[in-house]
Image (spheres, coloured by chain):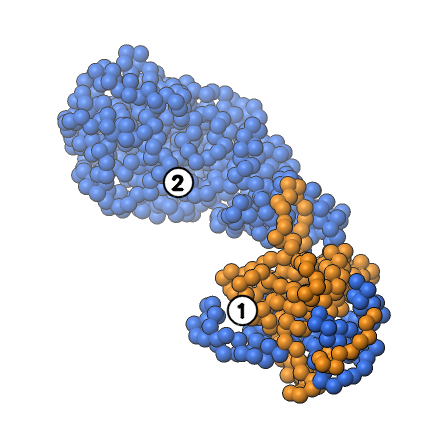
Amino acid sequence: MKTGLLSLNIHDSLTFDGSELCLHPDLLVVPGDVMVSSHPISTSRKIEESKGSSGGGATTASVNTTSASSTSGLSVGDMIEIRVWDPLPKEHAILKSPGSSPAPVFRKSRISPPGTVGSKTTTTVQGDFLPSISNSPTGSGIFSLSTDPAGRSSNTGSNTTLLRPRADSLAYSVGDTSEGDSDNLTSSRTYLTSSNSGPGGPRPVDSDRRDRTSLAIPSLGSGKSLTSVGNRDLAGTIAIPGLPVSVGGDNDSLSIDHVPPKTVAVPPSALPPVFPRSRAGTAEMPGIVPSGKGGIPLSRPPIIQRRATAGSAIHGTNQHHSPKKVHAHTRSISDVTMDTENLDGMEGVHGHVGSHDEDDHGGFIGGDEWSKVSTTHKLRLSFVLLVTDKTLTSLKGNTRTQVSMLRQVADLYSLSSYDTVTVHKIEPRDHNEVLKAVSADFVVMTIKDQFISRGDMHLFQLGLQNSWIYEGQRLTENTRLIKAHALEIRHGNDAAKSGIITDKTMITFRSRSARIIWLVQLSSEMWDYAPPYDHKGDPQSICEIYFDKWVRFLYKLFAKWKALEVTHSLTIVFFSRTFLGNGQSSPLRCKDVYGRSYVVSASQIMVLSFLIDLSSWTQLYMLTMAY
Amino acid sequence: MDTTIYADYGLLKDHYKPVIENETRTEWESLIARIKEEFVKYPLEVGWNLTDRRPSNASQGNVLEAVNVVLNIQQFHFLDRDLYRTGNSIVVVSPGCGVFEVDKGLAGITYQRMMDNGIGSDMLSLGLPPLHIAPFFLYNVSHTSFRNLPFVQTFLTVNASLTRMNSETLNRKVSTTAKPTMKCHTGCIYHS
C-alpha cells in the first residue's frame, strides 16, 4: 500500500516528545481494484499546483480521496517506508519511462539525437519515429500532443476516468519539472532550456529499470495483451531485422512495440486494453513476437494524427490547470502523459516498477500512482521506520496531505520542507524480509552524567526492541532515569542513519563521564628519542622523545574530548621503578622474576593515600609470595 | 615471604605519583602544562642519578604493580558510588613495546582481580610494535604456562593497524544473544 505524492513538512518539534513523524492514519488507502485498466483512477491522488503560475514558492499536495474507502489505514506497529522523490526535468521524465532508454524520441528539433544512439534498440526507435514526427502537421503539435491520452482512453474502452491520471501527472510534471523544488516559474524555464539543449546531454537513467521494458503489443486478435519484455536486449534483437524507417511499416510497428522508448509512440488506437501479467511472462516474448509480427496490422496511424484526434478532450482537462504552462510544454507533457499511460499498464504487469524496493510485493495496487511518480520523479532515498501511537496521534497541520517530520530526522536525510514523499506500508508478511535490510545490527549509545548499572542497560535494551531509532536520537527511559544518545547505528558493515532494533541488535553503551585513570610508566625509554619516521599524516619527520610523543597524542585526544563534550574524571599517575645500587632495607621486600629483590617505598605510597590502600597493598604482596 | 636480598642486583624502589586527580575540564589542554611540569620534576623527586639510583627500562618496570594499585581503588567501585559517573577505565601508558618481565604470581593475582571486578585495562605503547603479540608478559623460566592478562594493547606508533588483542578479544565468540557491552568513551584511544 502506498500513498500518493505528499509534501513533507518539517517541524522543530512535534506534539509529543519522542515522535519523529506525523501521519494521518487514513493516509494509506487501499484501493479496491487491482486491474489498472479496469479502475485506474479510483486510488489516484493528484498533486496539483495550488498556486499555479502565481509563483508561490511552495507546492502543496492535495489528496484526492476519491477512492471508495480506506479499508485499512496505518496502525501502530506498522512498518512503513518513506520514499523521497526528486522531480525530474521534463525530458528526463520522458526518459524515465518504463524501459527508460537514453533515446529521446520526441524532440522539438526533430533531429535524431546523435549522442544517444547507444544501442540497436535506440537506433530502431529513432529510425522509426523521426519520420512520423516530421510528418506532423505543425511544429506546434502542442495541444494535439496533449490530447493523446484521451485518444487512448477512448481506445481502451471509453474509460473516462483515465483522463485523470494523465491530467495529474501532467499537472505535476508541469509544476515540478526542475530538480529544484521551489519555484514553479523557474522550473518551467528550466525545462524549456533543457528541452532545447537537445538530446546530447547525459540523462540519469535508472539502471534498474532499464531492463524493464513494457511493450504494448497489439494483440493478435484477442485485442487484449500487454506483454512485457524483461530484457531490453531481447527487444533489440527482435526489432533489428532490417527495420526500415517507414512509417506504419510492418516491421516498424513491431519494433516499436518491443522497444521501451517506443512505448511512447505506440499508437493509442493500436493499444489494446492492458491487463496484468505475471513477471514470468516475459519469457514468452520470443514466442509472441513472431506471431505478432505477422499479426500486427499495417493500420497504425501516424502518431501525430492520433494525437490530433485525441486533442480536444485532454485539452479541456488541461485548461483549468494552467494554460500557460500547457502552451509552453505541451509536447513533452503529452509525451510524459503517454508514457505514464503505458507505465500504468506496465505497473500492472510488473507489480512493482520501482525495482529496487523490497516492499512492493503487494501487487500492483495503485499502479497509476506509482507510474506517475516514477516517470516524473527520481527516487532520492527511502528509509523504513515504524509507526508508533505518537506518529498517528500527534497530528499537526494538514496531515491528510502532508507528512510532518521532526527536523532532526529530516536533517539526517537532508530533507527539506516541501520535499515530495510517498509513504508505503510494508505488508506484515514482508516484515522479516525488510528487517534484514533495515535492522540496526550495532548501535553505539552514549550516556553522560549518570550512573547506569549493567542491569539497567540490559533492561533498557530490552525495552528498545522493535523500535526505530535514528542517529542522534535522545532515548530516555523515565522509570530508570536513563538518558542515552544514539551515537552510531550500523547495519552490517555500513553506517546507517536509522534502524530498527531487533533482539539481535548489539548495543554498546559508551560513557561520556567515566572515571579514567592513566598509569604512565616513566621508565628510562621515556627520555629516549622516538623513531622520527612512522608519523602517519605528518609530512615531515619529528624528532622527539617518547614523552613528547605522548603529549602530542594528548593534544589530539583532548581536542576530541572537547568535541565530544565528555565529562570524564581524569586521574594521571606516574609510576616508575628505581634500581638501587646500595642496599636499603624496607619492610616490603620483594623479589622480581630474576630473583632480584626490590623494595616498595612505603613513604611514597603514603603520599598517594587517596590511591593506595597500604594495608591491602601489603596483603597483596603477601599473597604474591604465597602464590 | 621471602626476605632475601640479593646484593648483586641491589634493591628496587617503586614510585607512584598522582599528577592529576579526578579532574574534569572543558578545556582539557590546560592539564598538559601540569603534566609536563610533573614530568620534568619527576626524576628529581625520585632521586634518580647515573650511578646508584637508575630508572628501570620499560620491560623491567612495575606495570602490574601499578595496575594493582589502581585495582585497590577500583575494586570498591560499588561502595559510595558516584551516581554521575559510569564506567572505569585504566590505561597504562608505556614507552616500551609491550614486553614486560613480570612475576607469574603477581600476574595470576592481577588477572584474577581484574576478572573478579570486571575491570579491563588498555595499554598504550609509545614504541614500535613488535612482530609478536602484545602485551607480552615474560615469566620466570620455571613457569611454563602462559596466561593472557586482560589488557588491550594499543601502540601509539601504529596509526593504520592498531592492534587490539587480549584474551577477551581473541577468544571472543559471537554471542547470539545481545548483551550490553560497556566501554568508556575515551574517544581517541583507538583512533589515534
**Cα distance, mark 2 to mark 1?**
52 Å
Q: Residue furthest right?
A: A615
Determine whether A145 is above or below B48 in the image.
Answer: above
Q: Which residue is situated farthest in the top direction here? A: A221
Dot 2 and dot 1 residues touching (CB under 8 Å): no
State the image quarter where residue B34 is shown.
bottom right
**Image point 56% across, 27% down: which residue?**
A429
Residue at horizontal 73%, vertical 78%? B12
Q: Residue at x 37, y 46 (%)?
A: A179
Return the mark for residue B128.
1
Query: Seen in the image, is A16 located left or right of residue A244?
Result: right
Figure chain in orange: B
Determine whether the residue tagged by mark 2 lies in a helix, strand or loop. strand
Q: Which chain is blue?
A: A
Residue A320 position, x and y percent, is 37, 32
Disc 1 chain ID: B
Asked which secondary structure carries label 1, the reply is loop
Residue kind at label 2, given as amino acid type:
Lys
Judged left or right of residue A321, residue A387 is right
Give the labeled residue for mark 2.
A378
Q: Position of residue B52 (x, y in %)?
A: 69, 86
Amino acid bearing label 1:
Leu
The mark found on residue A544 in the picture is none
